[in-house]
Amino acid sequence: MCEANAYFFRDDKEELILGSVDLVTPRDDGSFKLVDIFGKQKIVRGRLKKMELVDHKIVFEEED
């Protein structure tokens, strides 16, 4: 499987937003739409901090 887990980085730790993410789509308002392999969707407001594809992680953080 190639999906990843999405996390939000705050207070020096990563909090799970959504597991088994299959699709990440940037939106016009600066947020991101995440969709998992089951069709569950979440909107993330913040910026993309990093993607660790080998570790299947997508990490977001608050905007400055």
Image (cartoon, grey):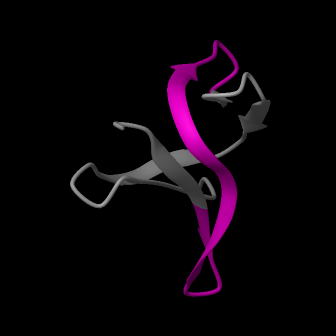
Task: Please tell me whether residue 42 is drawn above or below residue 59 in the rendered image.
Answer: above
Front-most of residues 1 and 64:
1
Question: Looking at this view, is 39 or 30 the one in front?
Answer: 39
Residue 50 location, quadrant: bottom left
- As drawn, 45 above or below 35: below
Reply above or below: 44 against 26: below
* Part of the protein shown in magenta: 8-30
Q: Is residue 11 magenta?
A: yes
Q: Residue 7: horizontal and vertical position, in percent?
A: 58, 60
Q: Quadrant of residue 10?
A: bottom right
- Residue 37, position as x, y percentages in the image: 60, 28
Q: Is residue 19 magenta?
A: yes
Residue reaching furthest to the bottom: 12
Using the image, determine if residue 42 lies above or below residue 46: above
Q: Give the main secondary structure of the magenta stretch.
A: strand
- Residue at x-position 36% and y-position 38%: 1
